[in-house]
Image (cartoon, grey):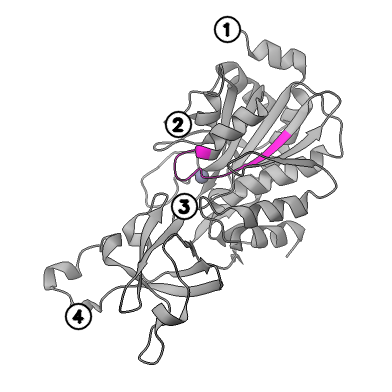
Amino acid sequence: MDGTEKLMKKMTEVEGISGFEQGVANLVKDELKGTCEYERDNLGSLICIHKGTTNSPKIMMAGHMDEVGFIVQQVTDEGFVKFLPVGGWWPGNVLAQKVAIQTRKGRVVGVVGSPAIHDMDKEKQGKLMKLKELFIDVGQSVDFDVKKELDIRPGDPITPLCDFEIMSNPKMYMAKAWDNRIGVLIMAEAMKRLAKIKHPNTAYGVGTVQEEVGLRGAKTAAAYVKPDVAFALDVCTAKDTGGNGKGRPEKPGAGVGIMVFDNSLLPNTKLRDFMIALAEKKKIKHFLGVLDGGGTDAGRINLSGTGILSMYIGIAARYIHSHVSVIHRDDFEAAVSLMVEAHKALDKKTVDSLRTF
Ligand SMILES: [Zn+2]
């Protein structure tokens, strides 16, 4: 594993569902030690600052640190853990998966269980089970009472458990939480590179919190930073699986996605065209992407104060909001390059010109 892969492993394996992002923030702080200053807003978003040759314009890159997971609802008298989803889950992705529960006294591993299939009615056997019918098995046995032995409480976070793996195609990486640790990694790597060069602005690399439960951290982080231009760095749905997205450009290996539409944001058209021209000029592999459903932090940042020039930069990922997702190394590199080039180019005069209508 090279240095980037080692960091990817740490960043994807760390546990951090919405509202419990501290482990991710610690990794970012370690990684940027000595290169940036840090601040936090009151919801916990991490704001890394690198001043270039001038204080303004302020350019913000936001990658949400949280991942989808679950939360403990109760431990039943039989010693099984009932849970609620945090973020969007398709029930088909949940059964028989490994999870880790973070309790006050440490980490408890478990597996999402269900009644044995032969004990179910015939018509139920062919159907997806609802989340509320499932439970987490943390090791209850005749001689071990989970309720007495383990200090699992309502509100404890539950995180998918999955090791980072490099696939046989060595540029493809399999891990949990690519949504959105890849965005956090792009932000951190871009900040590291910006710290070594001159850029005519101040860079705000932000790890936002609570995106998966409604873009909450982006709202307060944008109010805190008050950026002139903002980029949300996030995954977009890969369209090369299952035959549903024939001809669509959102594929692993296709480069960085300059996202022109999603349900939360119509990007400033001048900023959009500026980014497309920049990618072309610098020969950065890219595509114009469209997100069919959902929104990103950019949609929330865009509406902060009297409005902020915002864009969503996407990395094609397969199987997001499940235990295992897949991305391509080249897309990460392209996104970092695009962010660094954007910071080199976005001086006051350029940003002012993008703001005219
Ligand atoms: Zn996301």
Q: Are marks 4 and 3 in contact (CB under 8 Å)?
A: no
Q: Are marks 2 and 4 in contact (CB under 8 Å)?
A: no
Image quarter of residue 16: bottom right
Q: Earlier in the sequence, mark 2 or mark 1?
A: 2
The residue positioned 61% from the left and 34% from the top of the image is: 221
| Quadrant hosting residue 75 | bottom left
Measuring from the top left, give residue 35's x and y in whole percent: 84, 44
Disc 4, SS:
helix
Mark 3 residue crowding within 10 angstroms, few (<14) / some (14–19) / many (20+): many
Task: Measure the alpha-carbon separation of dots 2 and 4.
Answer: 44 Å
Magenta range is: 204-216
Q: Amino acid at mark 1?
A: Phe
Q: Position of residue 208 (x, y in %)?
A: 59, 42
Q: Which residue is mark 4?
A: 118
- Distance of label 2 from label 3 (alpha carbons): 17 Å
Q: CA distance from mark 4 to mark 1?
A: 65 Å
Furthest residue to the bottom?
A: 143
- Residue where numbered disc 1 is placed: 357
Q: Circle 3 is placed at which residue position?
A: 320
Amino acid type of the residue tagged 3 in the rendering: Ile
The disc labelled 4 sits on which kind of residue? Answer: His
Q: Quadrant of the C terminus?
A: top right
Q: Is mark 2 within 8 Å of ligand 1?
A: no
Q: Which residue is mark 2?
A: 262
Whether residue 251 is visible to the viewer of this picture, yes or no, is: no
Question: Is residue 298 covered in magenta?
Answer: no
Q: Are marks 3 and 1 in contact (CB under 8 Å)?
A: no
Q: Is mark 3 within 8 Å of ligand 1?
A: yes
